[in-house]
Image: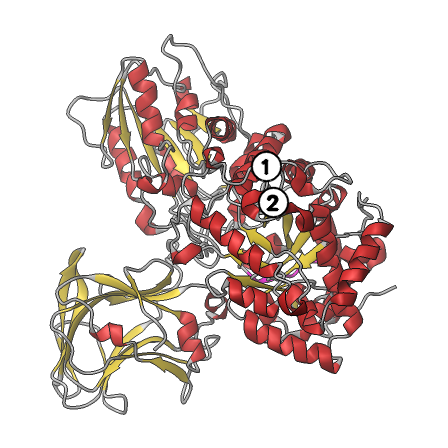
Amino acid sequence: MVAAIADDNPAATVHPEIWPRADWPYPVDASVETRIDAIIARMTVEEKVGQVIQADIASVTPEDARRYHLGSILNGGNSAPGNDEFAAPEKWLALADAFYDASVDTSGGRTAVPIIWGTDAVHGHSNIVGATIFPHNVGLGAMHDADLVQQIAEATALELRSTGMEWTFAPTITVPQDGRWGRAYEGYSQDPALVASYVERFIEGLQGQPSDRPILSGPHVLASTKHFLADGGTDEGRDQGDARISETELRDIHGTPYVSAINAGVQTIMASFSSWNGAKITGHKGLLTDVLKQRMRFGGFIVSDWNAHGQISGCTNTSCPQAINAGLDMYMAPDTWKPMYESLLAQAKSGIVPMERLEDAVANILRVKIRAGLFEAGRPSSRPFSGRFELLGSADHRALAREAVRKSLVLMKNNKQILPLDPRSHILVAGDGADDIGRASGGWTLTWQGTGIGNDKFPGATSILQGIEDAVSAANGTLRHAPDGSFEKKPDAAIVIFGETPYAEFQGDLKTLQLKPELKGPLATMRKLQAQDIPVVAVFLTGRPLWTNEEINASDAFVTAWLPGSEGGGVADVLFRDKYGKVAHEFTGKLSFSWPMTADAKGPRLFELGYGLNSASRSDLDMLPEDSGVVGQESSAGTFFDKGLPTASWSLLVSDGQSDRTRITTTPAEAIGGRVQIKAVDHLTQEGARQFTSSGNGPTLIELVTHAPIDISRETNGDVLLLVTMRYEQQSSAPIKLSMRCGEGCGGQIAPAALSALEVGTWQTVGVPIKCFAAAGADVSKLDAPFQIATTGPIDFSLSRVALGTVADTILGCE
């Protein structure tokens, strides 16, 4: 039998009969089915539609949830009670109560169905200040320790329960095949067998073993494996891209962990944003229904990713009957839930969505809620473990995380066996990553991208620097911390901590496997120290294997620490001997991803899976070739203007919006008949910005343009911003408009009043959600001018940088 294909695309045809059978551990319970039938019989069509929609807490209120009968809420990466990303745990629990109370209100004959709250607790309860932040999955994979993985899941479940939540979008069981993917760190390994060996244990840690006891009766939460299917197999590692692979590869590489997940009784599975051979997974009936539900016997419910339904052919974020008809059970419609509710209600009433399919989706959701014991659990604050905020970052959990850090470290070079170091000596700590817990934690930490978070937001945590200081002081050694590697007293050894800065989807994708140029500074420090005959230990913070031949050559020992999280003391545990000179903790980590010889993702490998030294290894590494194998360095994606200059393929133009256009290549310059003056000014670096002074008396348009239009539609589906780093030299009295252009006669313009009111004389980064321009009419899939600023009056401002990102000093609205 050949299953139905998605989008009439023969390349995306599946053959369910070749897929493995899983062993779903929950037998049909007649009493449960009778209960489900009775609930559905009482429900109105409005209640049924509401049950299959999930809204984000930044865009919905408890009253909304009551009125529209919503079945679920979530907190996205940047959502929190009162829009305070650092809200106290008490506020999270109070909000959980408010939504629960709304969902079980029976006034007016409503059917009470408890709402379910989903959150991205992907490496600990990582949205909550004070929680234990465990290493990201890329580090856990290097441990090769399924027992410890289960204990981490158990600890995460307990911390979740303390704030009243009952569902995490974890574990991520992707099998990344290309390190350029910005979410590669969410995968345990490129080896499906290793991933599969972790899956059952992690799910058991979250949910407990399958039984007839309600899941929430113990210290457990619901799990959700993601992202089904082949999110880690997309072409060139592009997030939300297309996996152009055979069905056999789809099954044997990316499908293998899902057999383990279903065997473990995972209650929910998240469908992927991505495509398989051109067909979006979220709308693929052959994969969602014929394979996952029927062939593989999955008996929970399928939830989509953030507005992923809007990417299906023929759909929008606000209307997509194709998804539920393909087998999706719950729409994650975070900021589009209300128009999605309205369109789906009309489609259900008209028969576009058959009532049988809608009721099947509702039944699948109710079945999971009943298995969880949600109907009997009561208010979140009344449940076991709720309000026990001492569980957040408890000593036991931090000890567990520290053990995971120790076991995840991979020793890749140890010439002359210089590691572990003697803590009784004089140690220099250099590099830019030593005293930054947020950097060590990576993305999906307190905020979506995990950027710009100070150590003060991690109470009880230990930075890598603090861990080193503790180890050295305990042995009566001495320490100097100097990021630039400077010193007065020559150190016995230098530890240089460097690597990637935090990122998540969109921002993390790379074109080549190398550090961005702005992160290469510590390499010069290592070379300088090495030239002074100081032993150099490099500690690399990264979410994926990257080309680091230069840094390996510039060090005597090289340790990959991945993204270790909040317990940086685990790094020091392995770098140093104890105060008696004995090896306290041995290096045991082994690569779960192969390591590149060049920055070419398809190039040769330097280290294969399973590589990793220990302190006893007698294997000095020779000098490595320092040819990256690619042309140029990795550039920051989505940067159009930087340090006062347009980046490659972009041009800076000043015009009157009509025919009088001047391309600015040198300064000083003038445009529009001398009405606009342009000169270089300093910001961060000499002449790192451009000042634009217009006398007014007519329209002025300043823009960045290209001849090769770009597609940022995926970045629009979220909280990605257009970032403008600027300074007013004088206050502007005339309205200022921002716009994006998508060719002749195509564009979207906004005029935020706050833009004209920015403080004079102060550099600041202003952010505008890309979706504002899309809502105003810009086709963001074909932008040839992603930044235009226009006014008809006098203006005097300086511009340093224009880029896409997620962190701004001021975020403007869509006025």
Q: Nearer the viewer, mark 2 or mark 1?
A: 1
Which stretch is magenta?
240-245
Image position of 630 (left or right of 535):
right
| Quarter of the rendering containing residue 265 | top right
Does residue 274 lie above or below 374 as drawn? below
| Quarter of the rendering containing residue 355 | bottom right
Image coordinates for residue 729, horizontal then vertical, percent: 12, 70
Image coordinates for residue 543, horizontal then vertical, percent: 47, 44
Q: Is any atom of residue 405 visible in this view?
A: yes
Residue found at the very far top of the displayed protein: 580
Was residue 67 drawn as part of the magenta stretch in this picture?
no
Instruction: Report crowding for label 1: few under 14, some 14 to 19, many 20 or more residues within 10 A (C-alpha).
Output: many
User: Considering the numbered disc 2 on the image, is that residue within a helix, a strand or a loop?
Assistant: loop
Q: Earlier in the sequence, mark 2 or mark 1?
A: 1
Residue bearing mark 2: 171
What's the distance in space between the residues labelled 2 and 1, CA to CA?
A: 9 Å
Question: Which quadrant is home to the C terminus?
Answer: bottom left
Q: How many marks?
A: 2
The amino acid at mark 1 is: Ala
Residue drawn 16% across the image and 77% down it: 732
- Return the mark for residue 153: 1
The amino acid at mark 2 is: Pro
Image coordinates for residue 60, horizontal then vertical, percent: 50, 65
Image position of 88 (left or right of 97):
left
Residue drawn 40% across the image and 74% down it: 772
Looking at the picture, the colour scheme in use is: secondary structure
Instruction: Report crowding for label 2: few under 14, some 14 to 19, many 20 or more residues within 10 A (C-alpha).
Output: many
Residue drawn 18% across the image and 28% down it: 487
Q: In this view of the protein, which residue sits in the foreground, 189 or 260?
A: 260
Residue drawn 68% across the image and 47% down it: 376
Q: Are marks 2 and 1 in contact (CB under 8 Å)?
A: yes
Image position of 413 (left or right of 305):
left
